[in-house]
Every structure is written in structure tokens, then in C-alpha cells.
Image (cartoon, rainbow, N blue to C red):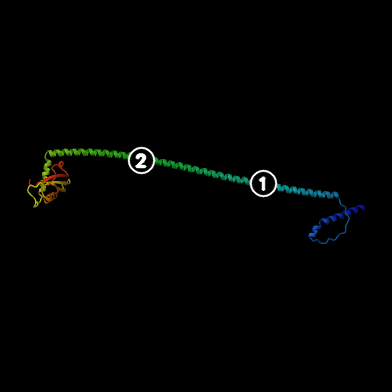
Amino acid sequence: MRGGAVIWSSMLHIAVLAIVIVGLPWRLERPQPAIVAAPIQGVIIDQAAIDREREKREQTARQERQRQQQVERQRREAAEQQKLADQREQQRVADEKRAREEAQRKEQERVAAAKAEQQRRDEQAKAEREAQARREKEEADKRAREQAEAKRRQQAERDLQAQLAAEAEANAAVAAGLQDQYMLMIQSHVKRFWQKPLSARAGIECLVTVVQLPTGDVVSAKVDAARCNGDDAVRRSIENAVNASSPLPRPPSQAVFSRTFTITFAPDK
């Protein structure tokens, strides 16, 4: 027993010396309080117990590492799941946004197409109304022209008939001597207003052109100098006499009335 105690005591000293050598750098870095050597007592060391304790600590360390690895793996998996969930949510939001934009685009295209179609129909209807209005106006203008032409022809026919009737009446009046009678009435009427100038000779005979209104009012009187045997004073006196005789006598028949006519002024006849 004594020999065994010595062995264990030697081993203890060796262990203490090893600890001192291993911890020496640490003690050099940090001043340690002085260690008072205690009396060394012999202890019996159970190697199997030491091995079991070391194995227990190692197993605990392995379990802790495994636990930490599992926690880290779970953390990574959770982060990956969260990342995938975030990506899916982003994809869902993006898909919804694209769907809304596509729906809006289609709605805008539908509204634009409907508006364009309505505008096309409105323009077509307007063009048809304008074309119909033009056709109606053209037809109305055509009818108005036809009616005006018919009235013009009717009026021309009436005028022609009236002219023919007037000419026939005038011819009849002339044939009956009413034209000569009317001219004699005018000549006699004008003579009453003639003031004979000093230069007048016997046998004066001048052709006078007279313009009158339907009322007999004289518009003008002009002596033809080439067909008058009097001088200027005579011609002026004759023109003055015609103007002074206004209004002229009314014709015995309207058929012999003429706005412009000629008479021969011969005061001695």
C-alpha cells in the first residue's frame, strides 16, 4: 500500500507540474497572486472515472454541437421558407398587377373601339343626312327651276298673245284711221303752245321725235335738224311747245298708244 501511495503521489505532482507549465503563459500575461504551496497529499485517481467523465463531456459537447447545428439548419430552412414565401407573395402581387393592367388595357381598348365605332356611325349618319339634304335641295331647286321655266314660258306665251293682240288691235286701229287721228290730235294740241319766233318763215315743216309716259306726260322732244326747214330758234320753239303741251291728249284707242313716236310740226297746215 505504501508503494502504491507513493506512485499516486508522484503522478499527482507530475499533473500539477504539467498544469503549471501549461498555464505559465497565461500567468505571465496576467499577474497572479502568489500561490502558497499546500502540503501535497496523496490521492488515489480512478482512471476509468476520468475516462467516463471525459466521454460524458465530449458527448455533451457533441450533443450541443448537434443541437446548434440543428438550430442553425432550422434557422436556414425557416429563412429559406420565408424567402420562398416572400418571392411567392411578390410573384402574386406582380401577377395581380399585370392582370389589373391587362384588364385596364383591354377595357381602354374596348372603350376606344366603342367610341371610334360610335364616331364612325355618327359621321356616316351625318354624311347620309347631308347627302339626303343635298338631294332634297337639288330636287327642290330643280322643281323651282322647272316651275320658274313653266311660268316664264306661260308669261312669254301670254306676252306674245298680248303683243299679237295689241298688234292686231293697232293694225285694226290704223286701218280704221285711229292712228292718224291720234297724231292729228297731238299736232293740233302742240300748235296751241307754240310761240312763233321772229325768224320763222311761212311754210315751216319739221319732224319731231317725242317720248311720253303712259299718262301722256312728255319726257323729251327733239327736232330732227336734217328734216326741219327752220333755224335754231324755230327748232327750239317747237321743242318748247311740245314740252309745254304736256300732258298730251289721250289716244282714242290704247292700241295706237306709243311711248316714242314722231310727228310733223307744220303750223301753216
36 lies left or right of 152: right
- Give the labeled residue for mark 1: 80
Q: Residue at x 85, y 50 (%)?
A: 47
Q: Could you say where residue 121 lies in the image, as x and y percent from the top left?
A: 43, 41
Q: Residue at x 58, y 45 (%)?
A: 94
Q: CA distance from mark 1 to mark 2?
A: 79 Å
47 lies left or right of 133: right
Question: For residue 118, which quarter of the picture?
Answer: top left
- Crowd class of label 2 (few under 14; some 14 to 19; many from 20; radius 10 Å): few
Q: Could you say where residue 168 lies in the image, as x and y percent from the top left?
A: 16, 37
In the rendered image, which quarter contains the C terminus?
A: top left
Q: Which residue is more in the foreground, 106 or 157? A: 157
Q: Which residue is more in the foreground, 179 or 222? A: 222
Amino acid of disc 2: Arg
Task: Work out whether 16 lies above or below 161.
Answer: below
Sooner in the amino-acid sequence: mark 1 or mark 2: 1
Q: Residue at x 17, y 39 (%)?
A: 167
- Give the labeled residue for mark 2: 134
Tell me whether the residue at label 1 lies in contact with that at label 2, contact meaning CB atoms closer than 8 angstroms.
no
Mark 2, secondary structure of its residue? helix
User: How many marks can you see?
Assistant: 2
